[in-house]
Image (tube, rainbow, N blue to C red):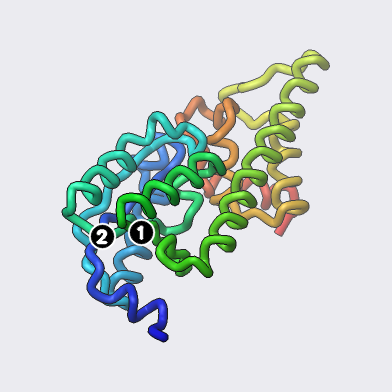
C-alpha cells in the first residue's frame, strides 16, 4: 500500500488562501503565512503548485468566495488535479458547504488537500476532515454568539460601543475569555472578531494580532 506522501507526488495543485478582511490582506496578516506553508508543503511532497488564488471574506460567506470559485473552475477545466489550502477551515467553515465541496471533488475527479494531510481522495481521511470542519464551524459560532451577546448587554446598560480611541470593556472581556477559556492565539482571536460586526479601535477595517496581544498584556493574560 502506498503512503499518502507517495500518492501526492506529481499532482498539479492550485493553492487557495483566505483572510476575513481587506485590512488583513493589505497588511499581510494571514495571507503570506498561508502562502509560505503551502509552498513548503508542495516542495516537501513533490506537488506542482501552479498558482494561488485569494479571498478576503468571512469563512461563512460562501457566495462571496470568488477566488475559491476561480480555483475550482481551473481545476475542473483540466489545468490541475487538486485544490490545496493551509487548513480546511480556510476553504470553508460551513458544514453543508464542506459536504458539497467533497461531493463535487469526488464527482469530478479532483482532490481537496490541506497542509495537515487531509485528503478528500483518501476515504480514511474523510471522517477526520468532517470533524475538523465541524469543530471550526462550532468555534466560530460560539465566539460570535458570545461576543454579540456581550455587545447587546453593553448597549442595554447604556454603554457606548465602538469608540475610536479605546476598546470597549465588554470586548476586552470577550478577548480575555477567548484566550483563557478557548485557548485561542492572538491571531485566531483577531480573525474571530473580524467575523463579527465589532469595529477595531481607531476605526480600522480589521483587527490585528498585535492589538490583541497588547490587550492580553494589559490584562495580565499570558
Residue 171 appears at what percent x and percent y?
69, 33
- Vertical arrangement, residue 147 with respect to residue 105, above or below: above
Which mark, residue 111? 1
Which mark, residue 81? 2
Q: Do callouts 2 and 1 mark residues in contact (Cβ within 8 Å)?
A: yes
Residue lying at the far bottom in this picture: please name it: 1
Which residue: 22% across, 67% down?
A: 48
Q: Quadrant of residue 27?
A: top left
Q: Residues within 10 Å of mark 2 (few under 14, many from 20)?
A: many
Residue 55 appears at what percent x and percent y?
35, 40
Under circle 2, the secondary element is loop
Q: Nearer the viewer, residue 19 or 166?
A: 19
Which residue: 64% across, 31% down?
A: 167
Residue 216 appears at what percent x and percent y?
68, 49
Q: Is residue 2 left or right of residue 191?
A: left
Under circle 1, the secondary element is strand
Quarter of the image containing the C terminus?
bottom right
- Vertical arrangement, residue 39 with respect to residue 181, above or below: below
Q: Is residue 99 left or right of residue 165?
A: left
Task: Inspect this view and state whether residue 105 appears.
Answer: yes
Which residue: 45% across, 69% down?
A: 117
Residue 135 appears at what percent x and percent y?
64, 51
Q: Residues within 10 Å of mark 1 (few under 14, many from 20)?
A: many
Quarter of the image containing the N terminus?
bottom left
Amino acid at each position: 500500500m502506498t503512503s499518502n506522501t507517495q500518492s501526492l507526488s506529481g499532482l498539479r495543485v492550485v493553492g487557495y488562501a483566505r483572510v476575513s478582511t481587506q485590512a488583513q490582506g493589505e497588511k499581510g496578516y494571514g495571507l503570506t503565512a498561508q502562502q509560505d506553508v503551502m509552498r513548503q508543503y508542495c516542495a516537501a511532497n513533490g506537488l506542482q503548485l501552479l498558482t494561488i488564488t485569494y479571498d478576503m471574506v468571512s469563512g461563512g460567506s460562501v457566495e462571496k468566495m470568488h477566488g475559491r470559485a476561480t480555483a475550482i473552475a481551473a481545476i475542473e477545466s483540466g489545468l490541475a488535479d487538486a485544490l490545496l489550502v493551509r487548513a480546511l477551515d480556510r476553504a470553508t467553515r460551513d458544514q453543508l458547504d464542506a459536504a458539497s465541496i467533497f461531493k463535487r471533488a469526488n464527482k469530478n475527479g479532483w482532490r481537496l488537500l490541506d497542509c495537515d494531510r487531509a485528503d478528500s481522495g483518501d476515504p480514511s481521511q474523510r471522517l477526520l476532515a468532517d470533524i475538523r470542519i465541524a469543530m471550526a464551524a462550532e468555534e466560530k459560532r460560539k465566539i460570535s454568539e458570545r461576543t454579540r451577546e456581550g455587545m447587546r448587554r453593553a448597549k442595554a446598560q447604556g454603554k457606548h460601543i465602538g469608540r475610536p480611541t479605546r476598546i470597549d470593556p465588554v470586548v476586552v472581556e470577550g478577548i480575555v475569555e477567548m484566550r483563557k477559556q478557548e485557548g485561542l492565539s492572538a491571531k485566531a482571536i483577531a480573525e474571530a472578531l473580524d467575523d463579527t460586526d465589532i469595529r477595531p479601535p481607531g476605526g480600522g477595517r480589521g483587527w490585528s494580532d498585535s492589538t490583541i496581544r497588547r490587550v492580553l498584556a494589559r490584562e495580565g493574560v499570558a
